[in-house]
Image (tube, rainbow, N blue to C red):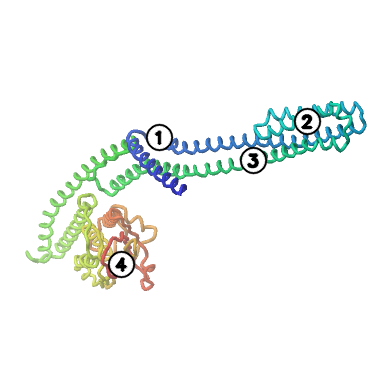
Amino acid sequence: MTSLSKLKKSKALLRQLTLSFYIFSQSLLNKVSINKLTLIGFTFVAMPLVMALLFGANKVSQLAKQSTSAIYHVAQLTQLNSKLDDSIAKIERSASQYVVLKDDELLTLFGRHQAVLKSIIKETSTKQQDKLLKERLMSLHFESDRIRELMLSNEIETMSLAQIQKEFKTLHQINKQLEKRSNFVVNEQVSNIHQTTENISNNILERLYIIPITFLIAGIFIILITKPLKRLTDKIKLLEQGNFEQKINLHGPAEVREIADALENMRQRLHTLELQKSSFIRHISHELKTPLAAIREGTELIYDNSVGPLNDDQQEICDIIRTSVNRLQRLIEDLLDFNIVLDSTSLHGLEKMNLSELISAACKDRKLDIKSKNLTLKCNNSPYFIYSNSKQLSVILDNILSNAIKYSPIDGNITITYNNSKECININIIDQGPGIEPSLSEKVFDAFYQGTAPINSQIKGSGLGLTIVKELLLRLNGSIKIIPAGKISATNTGGTCVSITLPNAQTDNVL
């Protein structure tokens, strides 16, 4: 129960410290630079580790001192027992010899040994802290004095060897008690060292919670530093995708706020320029389409001999005018499609749509072109619902289908398929045209780049179609690649496959 209670208190304290630290860090975030924030974070991470290191070093130092003192006392007691045994044996031997031989030199020798014993007792008593051990030493001292007085008295002259040896029994008993007490003190010292070692080990283990705290502090500072940068990166990606309407206003370190302010100024200028470009293109396209419609209508009337028959030269000139007008109309249409790329206001708003219906609508718009070349169109009609921008996707499909029709041979086939996975959906538009060299598979997406014109082509392209497609797919978080049709199907020995990949945000699908 005690351990569980301590654990609960530690967890509560950890949560409180984490909350307090997070609130403090949030208030600090808007006041310091990234350099200062990094330095503060390093200090907060290093401080608990330094404290734990100092604590451990202090405890280890205490253990070392205690162990040194204990070893010293153990050595003293071990030597004491040996010295006492030796001194008592010498005293008893000299006393016994004197009783037998009655030689005064032996009595003098007895006095010397007894003096040595007293000095040992005195030296040991001053260094020992154990009270019972001191009492035993004092008893030994008094008993040795009693024997000395006996040896100096007249009674010693009449005592036998057995009697004098009997007088030493008490001295030997006290010495044995002293030896037992010494062993007990030694064991106690060893036990104290063992207990201290366990306590230090437990204290160090208990302070291991500092490690998750340091990781937590490091994680918080990593988030504090990287989160504003991540938000800044997201804002830059929005600008990259042409979204100039969302205001850039970030909170964070001084450097992040400065970059955000600079990006906001750039966003405002880009938005203004974009609106001016879009307005200009819409205006000029409208102004061009109105007289162009009249020119085209008049040219068609003359070409059809509605106002009278034409000779061969006039018919040839009229055919040139008619072809040029059609090309100019196509250029204006591409220019309007390209305006969709420039105009960010037309790129917002996802809606649920049926992909098969969108493809059918694109094919219907190109019905006359398909019929003029007697092409066979094979489409996947399985219902598939996606969330996307219908205007953008229609322009993408129209441009790719237009290229497929343009480069397909007469009586050729065009196949449109799509398949999905959890992450994305792939749309493949396959034709039987001459194909594209691998070295040009990326260059065809450059603005105004035009490859080799197809045979018997009446209308030359503007070079903007695939550029528009790639830009719109970029804004839809999609991609496009051009690969030989033979890699998709073994039955297609030539031709081109344009593969589109879109994020798979769909629902209620059946394929």
- Tell us which disc is closer to us: 2 or 4: 2
State yes or no: discs 3 and 1 in contact (Cβ < 8 Å). no
On-image quarter of the C terminus: bottom left
Is residue 65 positioned above or below 421 on the image? above
- Tell us which disc is closer to us: 3 or 1: 3
Residue 399 seen in this snapshot:
yes
Label 3 vs 1, first from the N-terminus: 1
State yes or no: discs 2 and 3 in contact (Cβ < 8 Å). no
User: Disc 1 on helix, strand or loop?
Assistant: helix
Identify residue for label 2. Answer: 144
**CA gap, disc 2 and disc 1:** 80 Å
Label 2 vs 1, first from the N-terminus: 1
User: Disc 3 on helix, strand or loop?
Assistant: helix
Circle 1 crowding by C-alpha within 10 Å: few under 14, some 14–19, many from 20: few
Identify residue for label 3. Answer: 188
- Tell us which disc is closer to us: 1 or 4: 1
Q: Position of residue 44 (x, y in %)?
A: 43, 37
* Residue type, mark 2 in image: Ser
191 with respect to 248 (left or right): right
418 with respect to 207 (left or right): left
Label 2 vs 3, first from the N-terminus: 2
**CA gap, disc 3 and disc 1:** 56 Å
* Residue type, mark 3 in image: Glu
* Residue type, mark 4 in image: Tyr
Label 1 vs 4, first from the N-terminus: 1
Circle 3 crowding by C-alpha within 10 Å: few under 14, some 14–19, many from 20: few
Residue 35 is labelled as: 1
* Residue type, mark 1 in image: Asn
Residue 418 is labelled as: 4
Residue name at image x 27 percent, y 63 percent: 506
Q: Position of residue 361 (x, y in %)?
A: 20, 66
